[in-house]
Image (cartoon, rainbow, N blue to C red):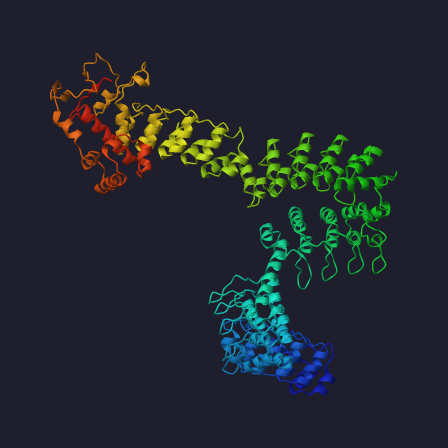
């Protein structure tokens, strides 16, 4: 190695500044000791703490990032040996505070492990990361000894730091503050952080420093207070605002559920209350005693003011959000002209900033109707008319002028609404103001007219052409094009007519400075129906494309202009047309939630499955809130799902004669009526039937809707279907009728309904089973037995059928009951009954073991029936439990119902006195029938096989 370099390294090691200055050159300033650790002069001087030499080397542009063979930079050396001043110098020259050596040791890890307290403190002040880990997975905190550990944990001199924050001593604070202690807590008292103390003692500058260095606005002290509680409690408005700007929670609560506005209201901190309310403080929150901020307000006057300001700021917020429901809630005569305490904005000012045209117009109408002041100025001396002109809201300008707004009102700079419209390049607003006779010659405070401020050539041309008069037609083609395009956009049909009368060839002229749109593009997009009609009659091209490949139909669909869309389609516009991104009009309207537009396009052949350039179909673009549009695009699937779920309102929008009988191809091939009947949606079923649904349509299994209603016991729906001529005896693929379904599921009322409307109980399924073979419920069996005891003749009318009470003791009797009644049938004996008016001895048949018949009398059974008690009668009814029987007996006693009264009662009468269960009413009525027959015609159940027929 060169002797000169040896001398240089030795001089740096010994701190011989004179010799260093003599030997150092630009070529050797970063030279490395090749015989040693490859250290540079800066390494040597830093490691030995030679401050003067380090300072000189840095002035000569020594590289602070040079590494030796162990990956150490000079900062490592200075930190390891505790040379605090040198460390500070190196950091001031942008040395990397988190540089890692070959073993991933940072300067902080070096200092911490060697007990260098001051160096650790300096490094932390410059952003050293205490969580960096070395190759052994240990951080600086893991390596720290007992002297440096407090520095890394934030405990080092924290009492001095807290006192500096409390007293507002910025210099002391800055000398002590690090990332480790910025959120330290006091060891005693309320365990406050520096930010708590600074906020409570109104140290605004200290708060700014702490927040810039990472102080936590949400940290809590011993009582759960955040710094905002302290600022609010002591009325420090500027500090409170600073904390809020840095994310402090307005409604943070302490351990006693006190919020900042509880603190401010209870201490009469009026300005802080106002500040908190502007940022949404919640007056409904209660503390641990159930008290709101209003409840604990220091005075009635303060309470009234807080309530007024809460309602006012809530109204401003609701207007800003476009929330019509909340606007109606907070809009009163007191709040209509409420102004923000800082900006001076009224609800009208805020409404001017809304982006949604629909909401903006609705809100303006609501505010103006309630008496909002039109010409009120905010703190910057701006009125609503200036804001609307600057935002190009011509429709709102029209509303303001109709409510007597001052069209020539000056703002704080002496500018009119026309100045604002012109400097923002808003042609529509300028045209509107000019046509309403605004003074174009007014000079601002700077001596400028609106023309002087115009930011676009179109506005300049407009202001020069119009001189408080209507359009002036000139032979200049460019001027005429501009006038036609602007008139098409604003809907001025008179100007459109005059321009095209003067030069008809301009009907398809282009907006060369914009999107290359035609007049029809503008008229369609801005919903100018009369202009669209005139342009089409004048030969406007419905297929003309703008710069993005959009045709006028895209524009009208995107903005939901139904009449314009219908008109364009009528004049040949294609619903399948795509722009440069393969987007169709249906994509546009679906994405914007335009239901009627989507419906119209689909009716005109729009393809719901067409994909744009990203592979998305229109359904993929529908927003979650536009469920009706999604339903429409899902087609038959939506119809079926809505019928299944019973959503009538959404179904009404979709149903057409073409889809009323649509099918579920992936399921049972059901119709909407099948699903409505099965899921007991009466209103849906009624709506479907009223609109042409086929009640006898069969699904994959041959079921009609009545099968479904019968199977699940939906009486009302079944009645509805029967009234619409549903086939009462329809058979499915297994020959099951609705009565089979109802009987097998124990649907008593449905069996009764079906039988009453002509259901045939004798029909058999493919397994030769009649409904009674499938019945399990006693009530159902009883109903079917009664029905099957009536022989059915193909030539007789229902009035000529035979009726009797019948008991079956064997399954073989089913075939007998299913046969026709015939006088010559040897298997049956006909018995002529005595008149029901006579009480002579009645003969009855009893089965003999060999099948022959004999005649006997039964005076005892008749006498027993004539003198039966209520308890005996209820036992005869065969209720399932004694409790059921007892409750009915008590009901009859309470209502004074005797057997003779009961004999006159029907189902509805029993239901009116409180017997709601159909099965109970059925048993009572059957009991009366048995009692009546026993007393009048005392023949009873036949104990063995055979049948008895009584001719009526």
Residue lying farthest to the front in this orientation: 896
Q: Is residue 170 above or below residue 942?
A: below
Residue lying farthest to the top in this orientation: 824
Say which quarter of the image contains residue 877: top left
- Whether residue 943 sits left or right of residue 666 in the image: it is left
Position of the N terminus by quadrant: bottom right
Q: Position of residue 793 (x, y in %)?
A: 30, 16
Residue 419, can we see it?
A: yes
Q: Is residue 252 above or below residue 952?
A: below
Q: Is residue 407 above or below residue 842?
A: below
Q: Position of residue 595 (x, y in %)?
A: 59, 39
Position of the C terminus by quadrant: top left
Q: Position of residue 772 (x, y in %)?
A: 27, 28
- Whether residue 736 sits left or right of residue 947 in the image: it is right
Q: Is residue 185 above or below residue 937?
A: below
Residue lying farthest to the right in this orientation: 475
From the viewer's side, name the closer residue of 772 and 120: 772
Q: Position of residue 34 (x, y in %)?
A: 63, 77
Give the number of callouts: 0
Taking the spot 86% from the left edge, 41% from the top edge, the residue there is: 472
Say which quarter of the image contains residue 340: bottom right
From the viewer's side, name the closer residue of 241 and 220: 241
Residue 116, can we see it?
A: no
Taking the spot 74% from the left edge, 43% from the top edge, the residue there is: 515
From the viewer's side, name the closer residue of 231 and 3: 231
- Whether residue 922 sits left or right of residue 608 in the image: it is left
């Amino acid at each position: 190695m060169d002797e000169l370099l040896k001398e240089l390294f030795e001089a740096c090691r010994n701190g011989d500044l004179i010799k260093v200055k003599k030997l150092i050159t630009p070529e050797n300033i970063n030279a490395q000791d090749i015989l040693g650790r490859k250290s540079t002069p800066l390494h040597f001087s830093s490691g030995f703490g030679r401050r003067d030499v380090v300072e000189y080397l840095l002035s000569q542009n020594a590289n602070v990032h040079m590494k030796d063979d162990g990956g150490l930079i000079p900062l490592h050396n200075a930190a390891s040996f505790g040379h605090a001043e040198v460390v500070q110098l190196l950091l001031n020259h942008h040395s990397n505070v988190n540089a890692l050596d070959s073993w991933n040791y940072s300067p902080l890890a070096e200092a911490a492990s060697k007990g260098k307290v001051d160096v650790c403190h300096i490094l932390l002040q410059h952003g050293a990361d205490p969580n960096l880990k070395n190759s052994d997975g240990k951080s600086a905190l893991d390596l720290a000894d007992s002297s440096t550990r407090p520095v890394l944990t934030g405990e080092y001199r924290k009492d001095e730091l807290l006192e500096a924050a409390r007293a507002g001593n910025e210099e002391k604070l800055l000398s002590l503050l690090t990332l480790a202690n910025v959120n330290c807590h006091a060891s005693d008292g309320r365990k406050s952080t520096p930010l708590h103390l600074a906020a409570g003692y109104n140290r605004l500058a200290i708060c700014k420093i702490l927040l810039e260095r990472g102080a936590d606005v949400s940290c809590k002290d011993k009582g759960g207070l955040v710094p905002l509680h302290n600022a609010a409690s002591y009325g420090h408005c500027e500090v409170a605002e600073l904390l809020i700007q840095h994310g402090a929670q307005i409604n943070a609560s302490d351990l006693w559920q006190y919020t900042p506005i509880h603190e401010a209201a209870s201490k009469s901190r009026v300005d802080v209350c106002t500040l908190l309310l502007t940022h949404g403080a919640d007056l409904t929150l209660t503390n641990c005693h159930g008290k709101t901020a209003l409840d604990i307000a220091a005075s009635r006057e303060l309470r009234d003011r807080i309530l007024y300001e809460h309602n006012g700021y809530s109204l401003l917020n609701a207007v800003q959000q476009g929330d019509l429901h909340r606007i109606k809630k907070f809009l009163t005569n007191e709040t209509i002209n409420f102004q923000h305490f800082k900006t001076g904005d009224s609800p009208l000012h805020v409404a001017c900033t809304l982006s949604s045209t629909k909401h903006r117009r609705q809100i303006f109408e609501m505010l103006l109707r309630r008496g909002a002041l039109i010409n009120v100025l905010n703190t910057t001396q701006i009125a609503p008319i200036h804001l609307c002109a600057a935002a190009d809201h011509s429709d709102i300008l029209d509303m303001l002028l109709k409510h007597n707004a001052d069209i020539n009102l000056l703002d704080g700079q002496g500018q009119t609404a026309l100045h604002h419209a012109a400097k923002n390049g808003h042609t529509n607003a300028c045209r509107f103001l000019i046509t309403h006779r605004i003074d174009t010659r007014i000079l601002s405070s700077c001596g400028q007219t609106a023309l002087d401020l115009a930011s676009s050539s179109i506005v300049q041309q407009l202001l020069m052409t119009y001189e408080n008069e209507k359009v002036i037609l000139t032979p200049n083609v460019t001027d005429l094009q501009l006038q036609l395009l602007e008139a098409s956009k604003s809907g001025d049909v008179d100007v459109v007519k005059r321009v095209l009368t003067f030069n008809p060839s301009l009907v398809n002229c282009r907006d060369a400075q914009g999107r290359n749109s035609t007049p029809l593009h503008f008229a369609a997009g801005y919903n100018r129906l009369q202009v669209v009609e005139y342009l089409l009659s004048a030969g406007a091209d419905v297929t003309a494309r703008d710069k993005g490949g959009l045709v006028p139909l895209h524009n009208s669909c995107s903005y939901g202009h139904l009449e314009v869309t219908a008109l364009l389609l009528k004049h040949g516009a294609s619903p399948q047309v795509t722009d440069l991104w393969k987007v169709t009009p249906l994509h546009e309207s679906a994405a914007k939630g335009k239901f009627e537009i989507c419906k119209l396009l689909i009716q005109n052949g729009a393809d719901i499955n067409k994909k744009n350039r990203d592979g998305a179909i229109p359904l993929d673009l529908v927003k979650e809130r536009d469920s009706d549009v999604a339903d429409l695009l899902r087609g038959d699937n939506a119809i079926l799902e809505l019928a299944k779920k019973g959503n009538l309102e959404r179904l009404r929008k979709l149903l057409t004669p073409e889809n009323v009988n649509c099918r579920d191809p992936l399921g049972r091939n059901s119709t909407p009526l099948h699903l409505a009947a099965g899921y007991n949606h009466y209103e849906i079923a009624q709506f479907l039937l009223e609109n042409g649904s086929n009640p006898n349509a069969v699904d994959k299994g041959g079921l009609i809707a009545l099968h479904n209603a019968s199977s699940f016991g939906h009486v009302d729906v079944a009645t509805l279907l029967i009234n619409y001529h549903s086939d009462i005896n329809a058979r499915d693929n297994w020959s099951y009728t609705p009565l089979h379904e109802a009987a097998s599921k124990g649907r008593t009322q449905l069996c009764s309904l079906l039988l009453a409307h002509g259901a045939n109980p004798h029909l058999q399924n493919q397994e030769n089973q009649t409904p009674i073979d499938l019945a399990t419920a006693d009530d159902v069996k009883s109903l079917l037995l009664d029905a099957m005891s009536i022989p059915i003749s193909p030539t007789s009318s229902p009035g000529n059928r035979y009726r009797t009470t019948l008991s079956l003791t064997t399954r073989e009797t089913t075939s007998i009951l299913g046969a026709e009644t015939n006088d010559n049938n040897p298997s049956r004996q006909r018995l002529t009954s005595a008149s029901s008016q006579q009480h002579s001895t009645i003969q009855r048949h009893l089965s003999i073991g060999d099948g022959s018949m004999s005649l006997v009398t039964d005076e005892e059974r008749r006498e027993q029936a004539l003198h039966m008690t209520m308890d005996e009668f209820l036992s005869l009814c065969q209720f399932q439990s004694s409790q059921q029987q007892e409750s009915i007996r008590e009901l009859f006693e309470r209502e004074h119902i005797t057997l003779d009264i009961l004999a006159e009662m029907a189902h509805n009468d029993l239901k009116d006195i409180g017997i709601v269960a159909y099965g109970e009413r059925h048993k009572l009525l059957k009991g009366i029938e048995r009692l009546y027959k026993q007393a009048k015609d005392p023949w009873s159940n036949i104990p063995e096989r055979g049948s008895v027929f009584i001719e009526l």
